[in-house]
């Protein structure tokens, strides 16, 4: 099985690439990202560097059997000062998805799209895959995920074989620094009633992707722990005496950091943590036969501070990224 991965240099890619190369079903892996800071090495791994909006990478992806699409502007992006440019982020997210769809259709590849549970917005009840998406207003990342999913769903009429994984908040040693830092800081916003949230460990997301390689499952699939806790309870698990802050203080600090100092995520990420979101994962467990290694919130948090394996070298000889960028 030949596998092509977009957004492969990101946090989840660091978990997924070794897992793919250790899978006996996978003959070759071609990994694409804008740039490679610490390129991994493996004799069956080919690295490509270029803009996801540049359709030239689609030619390289055409021979693949499975295309795993993870390229998306998330919290800590490579955009630097341009990270607040909403139009740019939207263009990267949507044009990249259109290219992934075109490449999959051209080669008859199965498309595994990594979406997000954030497409549901907040919900007062447990949500399932057949519940309509309703991203929180102003949460551009979630709106782009919803739009990308709609494009993929529409391409089903053209014969696209696709699964859309919707993980909840992904945590682990390689997860987004903002999310790990948020739990390490002993502060939380005092909200009443306290919203309930789920997590999912990065290794369990990688396992779901591996299960999706040859599965017949299509459409959206939720990924999350079987239980849910408030952020305050998560902080109590991580710290002996966490400090509750007035919500307006917490929101003001996040907005000042982003707009005033250019630090941290867009405030919409923190606003999303203020909303209950609990998803049903029966489809993943019954149809995809997903068995998470960290099935509860506490088990995910317990693994949070375990050291991550060193990045960059797997096995075999070195692989240098092939540039697809204009000279």
Image (cartoon, rainbow, N blue to C red):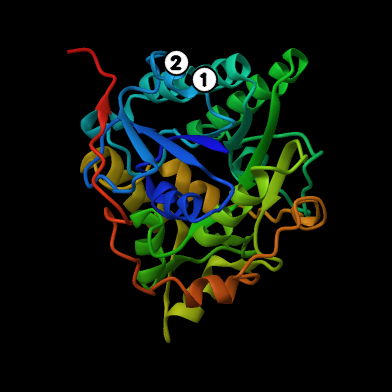
* Residue 49, above or below 210: above
Q: Nearer the viewer, residue 223 or 101?
A: 101
- Extreme residue in the bottom direction: 240
In the rendering, at what x and y percent does residue 215 appear?
Answer: 73, 43
In the rendering, at what x and y percent does residue 108 appear?
Answer: 64, 21
In the rendering, at what x and y percent does residue 12 appear?
Answer: 44, 49
Q: Which mark is residue 128?
A: none
Distance Cα–Cα, label 2 vs label 1: 5 Å
Give the left or right position of residue 213, taking residue 201 as reference: right
Please state, as top left, top right, bottom left or bottom right, where the C terminus lies in the image. Answer: top left
* Residue 283, above or below 100: below
Total marks in image = 2
Mark 2 touching mark 1, by CB under 8 A? yes
In the picture, residue 299 is in which quadrant? bottom right
Q: Which mark is residue 59?
A: 2
Asked which secondary structure carries label 2, the reply is helix
Q: Which mark is residue 62?
A: 1
Tell me what residue is drawn at x 71 percent, y 24 percent: 153
Tell me what residue is drawn at x 52 percent, y 20 percent: 62
Q: Nearer the viewer, residue 22 or 209?
A: 22
In the rendering, at what x and y percent does residue 273 appear?
Answer: 53, 54
Give the left or right position of residue 63, taking residue 158 as reference: left
Residue 278 visible within the image: yes
Residue 274 visible within the image: no
Q: Nearer the viewer, residue 242 or 78?
A: 78
């Amino acid at each position: 099985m030949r596998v092509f991965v977009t957004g492969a240099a990101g946090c989840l890619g660091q978990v997924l690439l070794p897992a793919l190369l250790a899978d006996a079903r996978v003959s070759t892996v071609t990994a694409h990202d804008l740039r490679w800071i610490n390129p991994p090495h493996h004799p069956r791994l080919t690295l490509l560097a270029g803009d996801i909006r540049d359709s030239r990478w689609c030619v390289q992806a055409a021979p693949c059997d499975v295309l795993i699409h993870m390229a998306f502007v998330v919290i800590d992006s490579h955009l630097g000062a341009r990270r607040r440019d909403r139009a740019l982020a939207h263009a990267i997210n949507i044009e990249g998805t259109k290219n992934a769809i075109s490449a999959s259709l051209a080669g008859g590849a199965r498309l595994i799209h990594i979406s997000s549970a954030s497409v549901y917005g907040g919900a007062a009840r447990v949500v399932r895959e057949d519940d309509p998406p309703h991203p929180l207003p102003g949460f551009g990342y979630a709106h782009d995920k919803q739009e990308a999913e709609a494009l993929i769903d529409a391409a089903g009429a053209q014969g696209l074989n696709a699964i859309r994984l919707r993980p909840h908040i992904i945590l682990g040693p390689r997860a987004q620094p903002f999310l790990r830092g948020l739990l390490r800081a002993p502060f939380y916003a005092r909200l009443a009633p306290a919203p309930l949230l789920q997590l999912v460990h990065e290794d369990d997301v990688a396992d779901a992707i591996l299960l999706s390689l040859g599965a017949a499952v299509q459409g959206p699939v939720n990924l999350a722990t079987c239980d849910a806790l408030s952020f305050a309870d998560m902080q109590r698990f991580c710290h002996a005496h966490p400090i509750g802050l007035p919500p307006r203080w917490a929101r003001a600090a996040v907005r000042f950091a982003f707009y005033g100092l250019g630090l941290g995520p867009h405030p919409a990420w923190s606003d999303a943590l203020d909303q209950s979101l609990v998803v049903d994962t029966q489809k993943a467990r019954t149809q995809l036969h997903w068995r998470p290694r960290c099935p509860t919130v506490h088990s995910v948090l317990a693994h949070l501070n375990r050291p991550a394996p060193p990045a960059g070298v797997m096995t075999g000889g070195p692989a240098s990224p092939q540039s697809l960028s204009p000279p």
